[in-house]
């Protein structure tokens, strides 16, 4: 597991939480829409039928209060539709767009991080390769030097063979010096790359990821506040709907309704006509 695996899992978890919250708000908006639809259907169901006896009954104040309740129920339903619309536009739509941007940013940061890791690993492999070549050339130079010294000490060896061994030792020594110079240069470059990797590149990428996470946390917090605010914005209007229902109920006149009973009864009793 490399140093970015844990960060990748954590940031993916953060995105999962955002997407889960979006799904939650979508479900809430569906509930609000369905509730509003049910309220409207309920109000429509109990509306008096036109040109019917039922419509005549709504001359009574209690029935008029009920009719006012049905009318306010439509307005009440409208506020739940507003909740659904505002949660969709202010939360789910905005968060869905933000999640896509967040995924792209996250992908970019981890791409840069892994690219930096691969670069430092490549530098390390180059250093190891240069070191092995230097060590090999040093051993070859030592063997060539020992062979030359052996040939030079042997009285039975011709001067030509000794000279050939000397030149070979000199060539091997020169190759070892060149390998040493290349290794030292590669080592210097690696040390510089390593300092930049651990003190500049990786800390910068980690900081960007941390900033990204902080923005994500702030964003979901703001969305949760909006969730509450959307409800709070319609509360006064819903309160007015309820106040109108209460006002209609307060206008009911029991005496006016009951006072009509004698005349109603009289009209029915007088249908026979004449004295008994």
Image (spheres, rainbow, N blue to C red):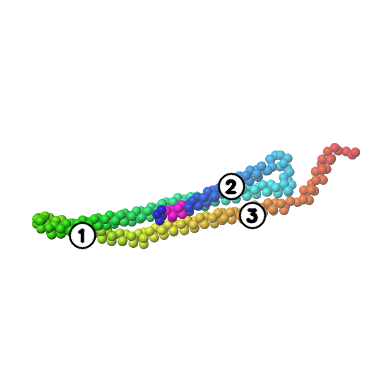
Q: Quadrant of residue 189?
A: bottom left
Q: If you read the primary sequence from the N terminus, does the residue marked by circle 2 or circle 1 appear first?
A: 2
Location of residue 211 by image quarter? bottom left
On the question of residue 102 being in view, the answer is no
Q: Foreground residue, 69 or 273? A: 69
Q: Is residue 202 left or right of residue 25?
A: left
Is residue 6 within the magenta segment?
A: yes
Q: Does the CB distance between marks 3 and 1 fall below 8 Å?
A: no
Near mark 3 (Cα within 10 A), the count class, few <14, some 14-19 or many ≥20, is few
Q: Position of residue 121 (x, y in %)?
A: 33, 55
Q: Residues within 10 Å of mark 1 (few under 14, many from 20)?
A: some
Residue 165 percent location from the top left of the image = 14, 56
Q: Secondary structure at mark 1?
A: helix
Q: Are the residues at dot 2 and dot 1 in contact (C-beta closer than 8 Å)?
A: no
User: Does the image show residue 25?
Assistant: yes
The residue under label 3 is 239
Residue with the mark numbered 1: 177
Specify the label residue 31 is tagged with: 2
Q: Is residue 48 above or below residue 255?
A: above
Q: Which stretch appears magenta?
A: 5-12
Q: Nearer the viewer, residue 62 or 119?
A: 119
- Give the structural element (helix, strand or loop) at label 2: helix
Label tally? 3
Mark 3 and mark 1: Cα distance apart in space: 91 Å
Q: Residues within 10 Å of mark 2 (few under 14, many from 20)?
A: some
Residue nearest the viewer, comparing 198 with 236: 198
- Left-right relation of 159 to 117: left
């Amino acid at each position: 597991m490399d140093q970015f695996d844990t960060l990748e899992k954590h940031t993916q978890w953060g995105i999962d939480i955002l997407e889960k919250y979006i799904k939650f708000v979508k479900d809430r908006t569906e509930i609000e829409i369905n509730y509003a639809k049910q309220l409207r259907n309920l109000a429509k169901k109990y509306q008096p039928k036109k040109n019917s006896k039922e419509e005549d009954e709504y001359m009574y104040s209690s029935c008029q209060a009920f009719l006012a309740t049905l009318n306010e129920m439509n307005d009440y339903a409208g506020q739940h539709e507003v909740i659904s619309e505002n949660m969709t536009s202010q939360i789910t739509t905005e968060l869905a767009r933000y999640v896509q941007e967040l995924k792209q940013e996250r992908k970019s940061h981890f791409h840069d991080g892994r690219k930096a890791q691969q670069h430092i690993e490549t530098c390390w492999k180059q250093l190891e390769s240069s070191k092995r070549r230097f060590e090999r050339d040093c051993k070859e130079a030592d063997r060539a030097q020992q062979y030359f010294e052996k040939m030079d000490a042997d009285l039975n060896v011709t001067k030509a063979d000794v000279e050939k061994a000397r030149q070979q030792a000199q060539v091997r020594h020169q190759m070892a010096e060149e390998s040493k110079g290349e290794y030292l240069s590669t080592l210097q470059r690696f040390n510089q790359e390593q300092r930049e990797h651990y003190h500049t590149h990786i800390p910068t990428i980690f900081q960007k990821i941390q900033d990204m996470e902080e923005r994500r946390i702030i964003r979901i917090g703001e969305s949760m506040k909006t969730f509450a605010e959307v409800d709070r914005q319609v509360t006064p209007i819903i309160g007015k709907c309820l106040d109108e229902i209460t006002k209609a109920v307060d206008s009911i006149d029991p005496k006016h309704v009951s006072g009509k009973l004698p005349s109603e009864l009289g009209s029915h009793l007088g249908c026979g006509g004449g004295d008994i």
